[in-house]
Image (cartoon, rainbow, N blue to C red):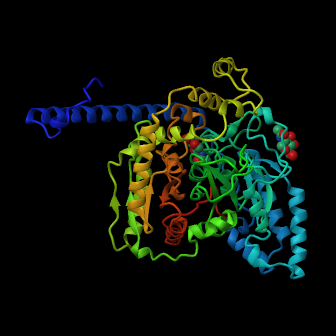
C-alpha cells in the first residue's frame, strides 16, 4: 500500500480533515483484507474440489477392534495388570496383533521390537506373581508405548526420515524414552515422521507416507504423524511425541486424539533428533499423544525432569467454578486460511460448557494483533534454534546447496522431499527484524500471562479445517501457525478432540494456559471429557 506511514506527533489527535483521512485509510485497509480473505477462501475451496476427484474412491475403513481392552486408557490397562486381571504378555500381544492388522494401510510403525517386548512382558508377569514390584515407582508397568522414529530408542531405526541416515540405528535411548521405560512402560516400536520432522505431513523418502485412519486420503499432520495415527487406530495406548511447531498437537488433532505440549523447558531434549540436551534456549518440548484425557497427568509426571516437577504444581487442585475462560475464533493471521464454521462450532461448544459452571462469563478476545503475525514470529524464533539446517539435511556431512537441491527436486533426482527443500530455500530469505520480533513476542507473552494468570484458560483454534487431502499442505504452507505461536510463547497447550465433522473427520480445539500451569490445562480437558463435550471417537465401527 502506498499510504504515507509517518505522521508528526501533533497530527495524532489532528484536525478533522486528518481524522477523516485516517478513517478512509482504515476502511480501505479493511476492504483490502476482506478481499484477500475472500480470494483465499475461494482458492482453498478450489484446491479441495480438485483433490476430491483424486480421492473420491477412498472408502476403506479400519476394522473394529477384536478386544475391548484396546479401546481403554493406559491408566486402566495399568490397573488391570497390577490387579492381575490380565497378564502383561496378553496386553502386549493384543497391541502387537492390532498393529499388524492396521499398519499396512496407515504405514505408521516403521520399526519394531515385538519379540523383545514380549520377552520383557513375560519377565514383568513373573515379577508381579512373585510380588517383586514397587508399583508406586512404576505407574505404567507393562503398558505398551510407541515413540517417534526421530527420537532415539536403543536399537531402533533412527533415520529421522532422511535417506542419508537410512541405515542408522539408535545407540541409546533418548531421555524421555528412558523415563517412560523406567516407569514400567514397554516400547513396541517407532513411528513415521516427515524428513527431519519439519513439515505438516508425515512423508519421507525412507518409509513413504502415513495415512489418516479416519480417511486414508487425508494427511495425519506432522511431525508426530505416525504416533497419532497408531494411537487412534488402537495399536498403541501411549504415544510419546515432541513438539517444536505443533508436532504433538497437529497430528493429535488430525487423528482425533489428545496431543499435549508441556511447558517448554521441562524435559531434557537429549536424543530428540540431533539434540544432545545441552542446547541453550529452544522452543522444542514434548508430551503425550493419547486417546483418554486421564492418561496425560501420569504421563507427564513420568517424563518431566524431576527437579522441574515442583514448578508445575501438578498436585494443585483447581476449583473450575473460579476459572476465567477466554476464547478466540479467528486469530487473523492473513497467511493462514480462515477458521471454518465447523471448527468455530467446536470452540463455541467448549466455551459454552465451561461457561455453565464458571462464575465469571467467558470473554471473547479480539484484536490481539500479535496473533496476526503468528507465523512470522515462529519463523523468527526458529532461526534462533541450535543447529544448521543445511548441514542437518545432509546428516552433518557438509552443507546442502539450496539452488542445486532445488534443481534436483524439479528434475526428480533429489534425495530429499520437497518440503525439506522449501525449508532450505526459506533459510535464505530475509528474517523479520530482531527488535520487532523480540518486542512483539514479549508483548504477547506479557498480555497473555497477565490475562490468564493462574486461573485462566484460552480456547483457541488449532487450525482452519479438519485434516486435508495429502499434498494440499503445499498450497497452504502456513496453516500450522496457530499451533506454532504457542511454541514461541512456551505455554502448555493441549489439542483436544471435539467430535467429528460432516465428512467424518476429527474436529478440535486447543486449550492453553500460562507457563507452568499444565495442571490447569489438564484439569479442564478432564472436566470437558467427563461432561462428554470432548473425547476420542474411534476411526472404525464399534462392535
Ligand atoms: C474419504 O474421503 C473421500 C473424499 O472426500 C470420500 O469420498 C470417502 O467417502 C471418504 N471415505 C470414508 C471412509 O469416509
Ligand atoms: C527399519 O527397521 C526394520 C526392522 O528392523 C528393518 O527391516 C528396516 O530395514 C529398517 N529400515 C531402514 C530404512 O533401515
Tell whether 224 sits left or right of 129.
Answer: left
For residue 471, which quarter of the picture?
Answer: top right
In the image, taking residue 499 as reference, residue 216 lies left or right, namely right
Question: Which residue is depicted at the point 32% across and 68% down?
Answer: 361
The residue under the point 78% across, 60% down is 178
Q: Is residue 521 above or below residue 27?
A: below
Is residue 432 toward the left or the right of residue 125 in the image? left
Which of the 4 quarters of the picture holds residue 8?
A: top left
Lateral position of residue 160 relative to residue 455, left or right: right
Residue 200 in percent (x, y) is at 59, 41
Residue 508 on image: x %, y % = 50, 55
Q: Could you tell me which quadrant the N terminus lies in?
A: top left
Q: Quadrant of the C terminus?
A: bottom right
Residue 339: tell me if it is visible: no
Q: Is residue 459 above or below residue 376?
A: below
Ligand 2, image quadrant it occupies: top right
- Return the residue nearer the eye: 211 or 150: 150
Q: Quadrant of residue 3?
A: top left
Residue 66 drawn at (x, y percent):
75, 63
Q: Nearer the viewer, residue 7 or 518?
A: 7
Q: Position of residue 517 (x, y in %)?
A: 51, 65
Q: Is residue 470 visible?
A: yes
Amino acid at each position: 500500500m502506498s499510504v504515507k506511514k509517518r505522521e508528526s506527533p501533533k497530527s495524532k489527535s489532528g484536525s478533522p480533515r486528518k481524522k477523516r483521512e485516517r478513517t478512509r485509510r482504515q476502511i480501505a485497509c479493511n476492504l483490502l483484507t476482506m478481499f484477500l480473505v475472500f480470494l483465499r477462501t475461494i482458492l482453498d475451496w478450489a484446491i479441495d474440489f480438485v483433490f476430491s476427484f483424486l480421492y473420491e474412491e477412498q472408502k476403506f475403513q479400519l476394522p473394529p477392534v477384536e478386544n475391548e481392552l484396546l479401546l481403554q486408557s493406559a491408566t486402566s490397562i495399568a490397573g488391570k495388570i497390577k490387579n492381575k486381571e490380565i497378564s502383561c504378555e496378553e496386553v502386549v500381544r493384543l497391541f502387537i496383533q492390532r498393529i499388524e492388522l492396521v499398519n499396512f494401510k496407515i504405514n505408521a510403525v516403521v520399526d519394531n521390537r515385538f519379540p523383545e517386548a514380549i520377552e520383557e512382558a513375560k519377565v514383568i508377569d513373573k515379577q508381579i506373581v512373585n510380588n517383586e514390584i514397587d508399583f508406586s515407582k512404576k505407574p505404567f508397568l507393562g503398558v505398551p508405548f510407541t515413540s517417534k522414529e526421530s527420537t532415539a530408542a536403543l536399537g531402533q531405526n533412527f533415520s529421522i526420515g532422511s535417506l542419508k541416515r537410512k541405515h542408522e540405528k539408535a545407540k541409546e535411548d533418548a531421555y524421555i524414552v528412558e523415563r517412560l521405560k523406567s516407569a514400567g512402560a514397554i516400547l513396541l516400536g517407532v513411528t513415521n515422521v516427515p524428513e527431519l520432522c519439519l513439515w505438516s505431513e508425515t512423508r519421507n523418502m525412507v518409509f513413504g507416507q502415513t495415512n489418516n485412519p479416519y480417511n486414508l486420503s487425508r494427511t495425519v499432520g506432522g511431525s508426530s504423524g505416525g504416533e497419532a495415527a497408531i494411537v487412534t487406530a488402537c495399536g498403541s495406548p501411549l504415544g510419546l511425541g515432541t513438539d517444536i511447531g505443533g508436532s504433538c498437537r497437529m497430528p493429535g488433532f488430525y487423528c482425533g486424539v489428545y496431543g499435549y505440549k508441556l511447558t517448554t523447558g521441562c524435559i531434557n531434549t537429549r536424543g530428540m533428533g540431533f539434540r544432545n540436551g545441552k542446547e541453550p534456549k529452544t522452543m522444542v518440548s514434548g508430551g503425550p499423544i493419547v486417546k483418554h484425557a486421564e492418561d496425560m497427568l501420569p504421563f507427564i509426571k513420568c517424563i518431566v525432569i524431576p527437579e522441574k516437577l515442583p514448578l508445575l504444581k501438578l498436585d494443585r487442585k483447581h476449583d473450575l467454578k473460579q476459572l476465567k475462560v477466554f476464547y478466540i475464533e479467528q486469530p487473523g493471521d492473513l497467511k493462514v486460511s480462515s477458521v471454518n464454521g465447523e471448527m468455530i462450532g467446536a470452540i463455541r461448544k467448549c466455551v459454552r460448557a465451561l461457561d455453565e459452571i464458571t462464575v465469571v462469563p467467558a470473554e471473547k478476545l479480539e484484536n490481539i494483533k500479535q496473533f496476526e503475525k503468528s507465523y512470522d514470529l515462529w519463523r523468527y524464533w526458529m532461526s534462533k534454534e541450535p543447529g544448521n539446517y543445511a548441514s542437518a539435511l545432509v546428516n552433518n556431512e557438509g552443507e546442502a546447496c539450496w539452488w542445486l537441491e532445488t534443481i534436483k527436486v524439479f528434475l526428480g533426482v533429489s534425495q530429499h522431499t520437497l518440503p525439506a527443500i522449501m525449508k532450505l530455500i526459506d533459510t535464505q530469505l530475509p528474517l523479520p527484524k530482531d527488535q520487532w520480533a523480540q518486542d512483539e513476542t514479549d508483548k504477547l507473552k506479557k498480555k497473555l500471562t497477565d490475562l490468564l494468570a493462574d486461573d485462566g484458560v484460552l480456547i483457541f483454534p488449532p487450525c482452519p479445517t479438519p485434516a486435508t487431502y495429502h499434498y494440499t499442505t503445499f498450497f497452504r504452507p502456513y496453516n500450522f501457525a496457530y499451533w506454532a505461536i504457542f511454541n514461541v510463547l512456551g505455554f502448555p497447550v493441549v489439542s483436544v478432540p471435539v467430535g467429528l465433522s460432516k465428512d467424518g473427520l476429527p474436529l478440535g480445539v486447543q486449550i492453553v494456559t500460562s507457563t507452568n500451569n499444565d495442571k490447569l490445562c489438564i484439569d479442564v480437558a478432564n472436566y470437558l471429557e467427563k461432561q462428554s463435550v470432548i473425547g476420542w471417537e474411534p476411526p472404525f465401527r464399534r462392535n
